[in-house]
Image (cartoon, rainbow, N blue to C red):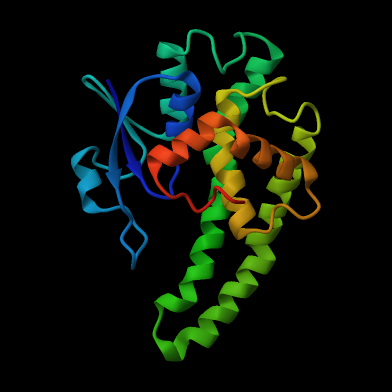
Amino acid sequence: MLVVHHLNNSRSQRILWLLEELELPYEIRYYKRDPKTMLAPPALKKVHPLGKAPVLVDGDIVLPESGAIIEYILKRYGNGRLMPAENTPEWVRYIFWLHYAEGSAMPPLLLKLVFQMLPEKVPFLLRPLVRKISCETQKAFVNPQLTLQMDFWESELAQTGWFAGDGLTGADIQMSFPMEAAASRADALPGRPNVRNFLQRIHARPAYQRAIEKGGPYIYADT
């Protein structure tokens, strides 16, 4: 039995979705973010030293990192589903998007979140100064990077509506979280109909909806 260590409102939601698409049996171990810090609870460090989610446990294998988990599950249990045939142009795109999601898409989104939260984390008298610095940094650096990434998604989705071929693959599942986060934090949808249509299509999938039912409330499901 596969076990997914699942943190609410996190990247681990897409692993539940993947398993639902494949109709594989699995068990969920639930964790809740600290309401003050929004960080994962210390209990996750008992599963893996990094204390992050998701973590997949398959027998003696303990595997963190969404991209690695998706690749592992599809290679071991996918039977050719949700990934293009190797050494095809679609497979090259699949590998790219599987790694791009965390390597390029998520860093500016994380910076956006940090700078949005920063003014509330300092003493009251310093907040106006910190808020000004935060806004200027977002305007000069973070927002242009986000616009670059989101416009890239829009242009790439114009080809087929998916990231690696004519239908859903693990690359789309991996890309779902940064796109949902961008829709929530960075105003990704206005002027980007392909991004909007992609999110609407995945949210309407029965497997996605089953993953929400099993994983619990997910703030990005309505983006």
Decide: is 176 above or below 68: below
Question: Which residue is rendered at x = 53% and y = 69% of the image?
Answer: 116
Question: In which image quadrant can residue 101 be found?
Answer: top right
Decide: is 159 above or below 10: above
Question: Which residue is rendered at x = 47% and y = 72% of the image?
Answer: 118
Question: In which image quadrant can residue 123 be found?
Answer: bottom left
The image shows residue 165 at horizontal and vertical percentages of 70, 20
Q: Quadrant of the N terminus?
A: top left
What is the number of callouts on the image? Answer: 0
Q: Is residue 71 visible?
A: yes
Question: Which residue is rendered at x = 53% and y = 87% of the image?
Answer: 128
The image shows residue 151 at horizontal and vertical percentages of 76, 46
- Between 80 and 210, the one lying in front of the other is 210
Q: Is residue 15 left or right of residue 191?
A: left
Single out the residue that lies furthest toward the bottom. Answer: 125
Single out the residue that lies furthest toward the left. Answer: 46
The image shows residue 152 at horizontal and vertical percentages of 74, 41
Q: Is residue 160 left or right of residue 70?
A: right
Decide: is 89 above or below 184: above
Decide: is 195 above or below 127: above
The image shows residue 78 at horizontal and vertical percentages of 47, 13
Question: Which residue is rendered at x = 47% and y = 30% of the image?
Answer: 67
Q: Is residue 12 visible?
A: no
